Image (cartoon, rainbow, N blue to C red):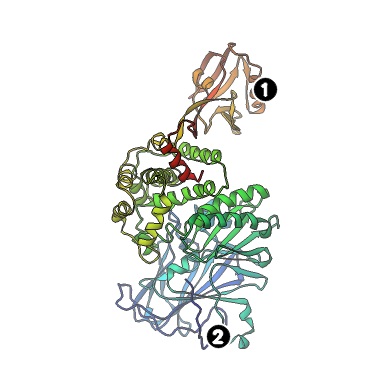
Amino acid sequence: MQRTIEKITTLVFAFAIFSLSSGCKTTEQPIAQINTLPIIASIDLINVVDDKVKVEIKVNNLDADTLSYYLPKIVPGTYQNNSYGKYVEDFKAYDALGNPLYAKKFGDNRWKINNASKLSKITYWVNDTFDSETTHDVFSPTGSNILKDKNFILNLYAFIGYFDGMKENKYNLFIKHPESLKASTSLEKNIIKNAEANPASDKIDFFSFDRYAEVADHPIMYSNAENTVTFTVNGINVLLSVYSNNSTHKAERLMPQIERVIRAQKNFLGNINSTQKYSILLYLSSSKSNDARGFGALEHNTSTVVVLPESLSYDRLNKSLTDVVSHEFFHIVTPLTIHSKEIRDFDYNTPKMSKHLWLYEGTTEYFSLLFQISQGLISKEDFFERIYEKIEASKAFDNTMSFTTMSKNILKDPYRKNYRNVYEKGALISMCIDIIMREKSNGSYGILDLIKSLSTTYGIDVPFDDDELIKTIEKVSYPEISAFLQQHVVGNTPIDYEFYLKKAGVKYGIRNIPSSYFIFEQQPFVTGLEATKEVIFTSDTPFNSFLKGLGVTQGDVLLSINKKKYKLKNIYDLFGDSNKWKIGDQITFKIKRNDEIIILKSKVIEPTVEKIIIELNPNASEQQKIVLKKWIND
């Protein structure tokens, strides 16, 4: 996506003043002719003031009366309004002689400039998001960090905006940085001409972009270059750059597992080859109140920004990286290669969302599981356990909500609160499609083959029409796939997972698993309230058979059992005391429910918890065995 500029005749650095362009014509109305000269942007990472950096945008020779400049409200890959203009301060506009022009802010993300025909440059200061996360909802990997002389996370859309009608203009970006910090990015650094006349040029990085969408798609992390490694996997040049403030983790030690994962992913994808370079920018947070606390990642075409806790052990960090990178890397296929017109021509301030989050996030999440079993990284038992976890997690959301309707309206309620289901039911949708295709083709074709066909039909520069996608899928797969999508994705019919898993010779059912009285698999059924010192029944796991039979409900306050009182200070006695109970003994609970005292009596029974079991059927038919073998490479 990057092109090196071969010839630049003059570069004069008095930082933030770069003379490369001489003409841009635009108005606030749709324009007939797009400017061919680049917009010049500069970011100063040396002269940091009050944890803010200065940005300058240069244009000139405009023939508009007024012109608006925007920072994005939302960017691709995120599904919430972040309004990055809220972190911009001291916005000013100037003519070529340095005289100020009238500029006024409208809303969070727009500045209107009068006498735009005289406009030469705008300047403003940008604050970061990492150190103020208690005051906003910007997810850390989608935000920014300014840590003078140590680390800068530059999701460029948080620093550089666009002029109305000029998103297709080329951009030249100059970043002035401390000599001790180096840029980690998938971007190609361009050569600055006349470096001999400008000894400061080694402190200035120069990048070029064909359009604003490329600016928004290329994050850069500045940090100590010693904590970076590069390696090649199946034709992809991979960069792993790690910021660890306390030097707890080193890129070199993390590299072997990352290399193993990406190699397996490339083997899984086969001839799908949409990138030759990929960068993993890993920021390890202290998790303190003034540091990032939203852990996860954001995908880009050729990179991902990952934020995780620095306190993780090496093994846990490796596991987290495996899960995160597995998901984000597969985004090079969906939606970064296969996407709708809404994504290709993304509107950063009045977005029109696509209907097909099940494809973008669901298929990606499913691939992140499927490749691990097909490439031998996890066992069948682990794979089925993760499928089970997704089925269980999906129950927390509205199972009758149309996925296409949710996707189209994901930025508003009630759909927004169901967003997380794209990683749960979304992945299960792809699983069912995979199994159907394996059954119909006697094991020969699966969902990966479907994605390969869609990659051929569409591509980075050939978006699909939202309303036509399912028809196209039917043409390159089977009518049964279209029927499934219409019923369970467009429609609101819940999916019968037992029905589809059975096609692959997999049993799906409920089994009673032994439980302790007050805890199951490290998940307690009670917790202590610090404010009232009370013991309350609350759990993410359904209560066991004993508590259900006794009549306990979530939110009940436990006062005593057989006249022994329980408070926060002796909550752990519950576990020891219950171990002494004998089956058949009479038990009496005294609880408080909605300020009413209630006595619950029962006999002690062996507690069990109902758990969904997904396992191979030893009596599977030959057809089912074929589907299973091709599905998970068994």
Task: Give the CA separation, mark 1 to mark 2.
Answer: 76 Å
Residue extending furthest toward the front: 622
Question: Foreground residue, 374 or 422?
Answer: 374
Q: Pointer 2: residues within 10 angstroms few (<14), some, or many (20+)?
A: few
Residue 346 seen = no
For badge 1, the amino acid type reads Gly
Query: Quick check: 517 above or below 304?
Result: above
Residue 334 is drawn in which quadrant? bottom left
Residue 318 seen = yes
Residue designated by label 2: 12
**Residue 306 location (% of width, % of height):** 56, 56
**Residue 231 location (% of width, % of height):** 62, 64
Q: Secondary structure at mark 1?
A: helix
Q: Which residue is rendered at x = 68% and y = 60% of the image?
A: 252
Query: In the visual, does 403 lie left or right of 281?
Result: left
**Residue 599 location (% of width, % of height):** 52, 15
Q: Pointer 1: residues within 10 angstroms few (<14), some, or many (20+)?
A: few
Q: Nearer the viewer, mark 1 or mark 2?
A: 1
Query: Quick check: 630 above or below 210?
Result: above
**Residue 343 location (% of width, % of height):** 38, 60
> Which is more N-terminal, label 2 or label 1?
2
Q: Secondary structure at mark 2?
A: loop
Question: Foreground residue, 561 or 228?
Answer: 228
* Tag shown at residue 576: 1
